[in-house]
Image (cartoon, rainbow, N blue to C red):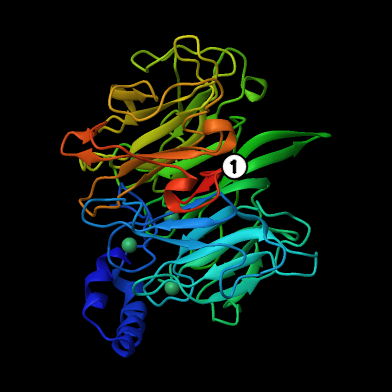
Amino acid sequence: MGSLGGLFVIATVTAVSASAVVLGAGGAATAAPAGAAGSAAGKQADFNGDGYGDLAVSGGRAVTVMSGGPGGLSTSRRQTLTPASTGMPQSGGAGFGDSLAAGDLDGDGYDDLVVGFDGASPADPDVAVVWGGPGKLSGTTFLSFKPGYGSNGPMVVNDFDGDGKDDLVAETVEGTTLFRGPFRRDGSSASTTLVNTGVLAYDLVSGDVNGDRVADLLAIGRRRTGTTDIADSALVLGSGHGFGAAEVFRTRSTSGTIGDVDGDGYGDVILGAPLEGHNPAGVVGGSIVVEYGSAGGVSTVRKPVRISQDTAGVPGVGEKYDRFGWDLDAGDVNRDGYADLAVGVHHENVSGVTATGVVDVLRGSAKGLTATGAISWHQNTAGVPGVNEKYDEFATRVSLVDMDKDGRSELVAGTSSENVDQGNVWYFKAGSAGLTTRGVVSFGPSSVGLPSKYAAFAREMTK
Ligand SMILES: [Ca+2]
Ligand SMILES: [Ca+2]
Ligand SMILES: [Ca+2]
Ligand SMILES: [Ca+2]
């Protein structure tokens, strides 16, 4: 989508539609799905088709869409969607944006934004698809597939069957469901199939683990063993003839991402196990596990690698309730071809300030994820706006996204808890040496024209 953006800039509206059809049809044979092998940076949203990554942030009873540009993120370049916006539900709309997904559902070359919310009544729609296009998102199609599930049912968009068209996978009242694209503007999809992951999903993530350029699905949630549910995740490989058998990881994970951290063309699954109660004994403060990809899916030869704050070279010390790995995202911050990993440690204490939070970034390398060159930043780090306060929970949400189109991902760290639940976002730029604390953009709800009080801004962000 990003690589096609330049063509749309000079086209008229009519020509955009025509060229989008041609490019979409040819895409199956030539274009790797975003997030597939060869792109360590992974899939990212581009709603206006200009090739710059865009970021959607929920909070303040709205979803704020920040457009990328030559200088990266700018708070002046934004679009605000609320339940009261034209075409939106008007009534209801609680939890608007508690769940977000992005991808090109109608196959017109522009990524579309999928917003979950609570319908006014169980019979009302609970998902809005807002269509991407030149300039901005416009036009809404409602879907209704989560009645009773609530506004935060997870959704993810990618090409899971390799036909060059993005598909939507969502947790619905029926279970995890694949809606094959392209979608039409009446909300109909090409087909609908249930996906057996063995997990009741709280989060859904995509990437290409077996290097076949077809997106694979990682479901993170809970798995029933006997009479108890335990936190766990499962991977199912996408293909032209449906998803494969579920591979369940027994790591008690509650977060996850997929990125090629060793640059071998196979996406690697990184699982977060931030909660002691869910961890195997001995990992105090939380940990992550890297399961390396291979042609057959997750490697059966290469051992999973567990990393915590007590691993040599990793910043910090594992202490109870740190929640290392609460949120994760992979992207290439220095364009060396190895995906790097942002790790939220939102309950980390800094100099005795309880749960103020830090963000760590671990580098990818030919040997895999490494502590060499690791970053650990918080609000008292030089150059970072703000001050560490109790329960700021900095980096509750992390995202790596290339908004200035230089091939390097910038770091976005968010918390909905900053300043008594107003919430805030920090955007860290990336230069030739990687991420930097120079020129950090810090913004909260009032910076983007939203009510501040209990806005819980950055409750959710696209990745
Ligand atoms: Ca863009
Ligand atoms: Ca689209
Ligand atoms: Ca695949
Ligand atoms: Ca790999």
Residue ranking furthest to the right: 227
- Marker count (numbered): 1
Question: Is residue 335 toward the left or the right of residue 61 in the image?
Answer: left
Q: Quadrant of residue 431?
A: top left
Residue ranking furthest to the top: 352
**Amino acid type indicated by mark 1:** Lys
Residue placed most toward the observer, 445 or 278: 445
Residue 359, placed above or below residue 315: below
Q: Quadrant of the N terminus?
A: bottom left
Q: Quadrant of residue 14?
A: bottom left
Q: Is residue 362 visible?
A: yes
Q: Which residue is mark 1?
A: 453
Residue 66, placed above or below residue 309: below
Question: Is residue 82 toward the left or the right of residue 264 in the image?
Answer: right
Tell me the residue at 43%/40% (across/down): 425
Question: Is residue 315 toward the left or the right of residue 285 in the image?
Answer: left
Q: Position of residue 367 (x, y in %)?
A: 28, 29
Residue placed most toward the observer, 292 or 151: 151
Residue 325, placed above or below residue 74: above
Residue 417, placed above or below residue 190: above
Figure quarter occupied by ligand 2: bottom left
Tell me the residue at 24%/83% (across/down): 11
Q: Position of residue 312 (x, y in %)?
A: 36, 13
Q: Is residue 296 visible?
A: no
Q: Position of residue 151 (x, y in %)?
A: 68, 54
